[in-house]
Each structure stands twice: as C-alpha cells, then as structure tokens.
Image: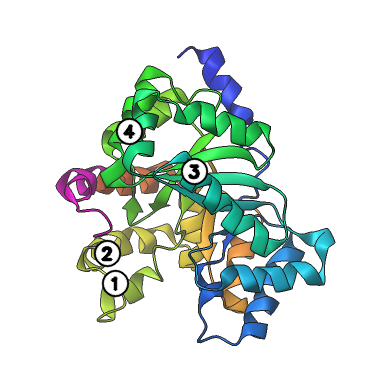
Amino acid sequence: MTKGQVSEKAGLLSDLSPYVYGTTRLGDERIPFEDRVSIARAAMDAGVWFHTSHTYGNALQVLRAAFDQDRARVPKLIVKIGWSTLDELRDVIRQNLEPLGLESLELGQLCLGGPLAEEFATGGPCYEGFARIRDEGLVRRFVLEVFPWTSEVPLRALRAGYPEGIVDGYIFYLNPLQRFASNELWGLLAERGEPIIAMRTVAGGPVHRLRDVPGAAWKDYLQKRAVEVAPIFEQSGIASWTEFCVRFAHSFPLVRATVGSTARPAHLAEFLAAAEDIRPLTKNLVDEITALQVRWSDELDIHAEPWAM
C-alpha cells in the first residue's frame, strides 16, 4: 500500500465521537426501566455515538423509549450485525432497525462466522452482498469485528486487498489489559493505516479492583494482567483509571473512538469528562503496555478457545 493510499484512510470514520456510549448495561432488567431510559437520554444529550445490539437483553426497547422522547437527538449508531450467511445478516439488520424505528444503520459491525467468514477471507460473494446492502441504504458503512481467534480472517483478506472500498475499519477490545487483534494483524493494520474502534474502554473496572478484589475480574488472566499494569498506571500520576484508559486508546493514531458501557450516571460523566480534551499517554507508558500486550498475545490470546477470554 502506498503512502497516498494510507493517507486516504485518514478521513475514514473521522466523524465518530471520541467516546462512544456502549449500551450493554441498558439490557440489564435488574435496573429499573426508567433509570435505563434516563441514562440513555443523558448520553443522547451529550451528542455522542452509541454502540448497541439486539442481543443485549431489552436494550433496544430502552433505546426506543429514549429515542421517542426526542427524535431530534437520536444518535448515530454502531450496531452488531452478522452471522453466517447474507440472508441471516439481512435478518439481523431488520431485527435492529424495526425495534428502534429506524430506516438505516450508520455503521454495521460485521460479526462473521461460518461460510460468511470464509467468503470474507477469500474474496467471495459476501463483498457484493455488503455493497448491495450499503447501496440500498440499510447500512451506510461497515467495520469488521475482530477477536484473537478470528484474526486470521481479516489477515488473509487484507493481504489480498478484498475489503478495500467495502470495510472502513476494524473494531475490537483495545484497552490496557486487552488487545484482541493478533500481533500479526495489529502490525498489518498499522502498516496499512486502517481505522480502529477500541472496545471495552476500562477492561471491566478499575485496575486496582481487578487486581485486589476476589472475583472482580471475570477471568483469572485479567487479574494477572492487572498486577502487571497497575504499577504503570500508578507511574502515570493520572488519578482516574477511566481517563488513563481513554488516553491509552487514543495514544494510537489509528484509533477513532473508544466504546465504554455503563448504566450509572457518575460513570457516564467520567467517560464524557475523559473524552473532552484527550491527551495521549507518554510514549514510555504506551511502550510498556504495548510490550506486555505483544507477550500476552503470543502466550495466551491466539491460543484461546472462542469466547474463553
């Protein structure tokens, strides 16, 4: 890829808000419905993009209630769509559009498996299908979801140039404790200047809590990584783990936005404050964490069973 082609990608996904409100917790029915509508309205009033899915409990019902209160403030959405065939993909798009009362999705997060993933890797007919969906206005743009156990699919596709003009970027967990693209894919994305959306901003909670509170980390590997990252966080002198994580994600020029989920007003306020004037972390801090992530990827991530992390 030439420098000119890389520079052309600089404008892709540049309209994303630096912080994207994740709606996973809006599907938690243990929280009163009206409280969830209220936090959605607060995020709407802030003018940020939203990330959602019909798989998040009744989150779409909550969003519909919030949207109907003020249709002028309906946010742009990143929505998970998939899975194994184009027909299934179209049906999932419908399952998201209809409950929200929308006619199109701004950004579709392609979550591909089975035959559809293989077509993506080998330049199959899925690309024509994605283009038709875009031309019909159902989804305006696409990004590809990546996990350690799926990194080989975009790696094969990118090397052959298949996603060019169809996929505008890549979305995966990227925070101080997780970088869910393999080392090889991460290097290729950087080489090609591919836009990235970083998910799971704070890695599940404050690093000291993940390190010190039994059961706070949902998997043992996160607790072990928190032990290694906590001293780097302390070295930074930054008081807020949320600010540290937002600044970490945006320390990489390819990152357009970071997606963080919450149903708590105080936590939303933290995310919004951290995204107001983002300054990248110092190079030495980023380099220390990056070196850890390279090691973690080789030791664990690429060997993990699907959904084991």
Of label 4 and label 3, which has the lower sequence position? 3
Of label 3 and label 1, which has the lower sequence position? 3
Residue 41 seen by the camera? no
Residue under numbered circle 3: 87
Q: Are marks 4 and 3 in contact (CB under 8 Å)?
A: no
Kind of element beneath mark 4: helix
How far, Cα to Cα, is label 4 from label 1?
Answer: 31 Å
Q: Nearer the viewer, mark 3 or mark 1?
A: 3
Residue under numbered circle 2: 222
Q: In the image, which disc is placed on residue 118?
A: 4
Using the rendered view, name the quadrant where residue 151 is placed.
Answer: top left
How far, Cα to Cα, is label 3 from label 2?
Answer: 37 Å
How far, Cα to Cα, is label 4 from label 2?
Answer: 31 Å
Residue under numbered circle 1: 218
Q: Nearer the viewer, mark 4 or mark 3?
A: 3
Quadrant in the picture for the C terminus: bottom left
Q: Nearer the viewer, mark 3 or mark 2?
A: 3
Q: Are marks 2 and 1 in contact (CB under 8 Å)?
A: yes
Q: Which residues are magenta?
A: 294-309
Quadrant in the picture for the N terminus: top left
Using the rendered view, name the quadrant where residue 75 is placed.
Answer: bottom right
How far, Cα to Cα, is label 4 from label 3?
Answer: 16 Å
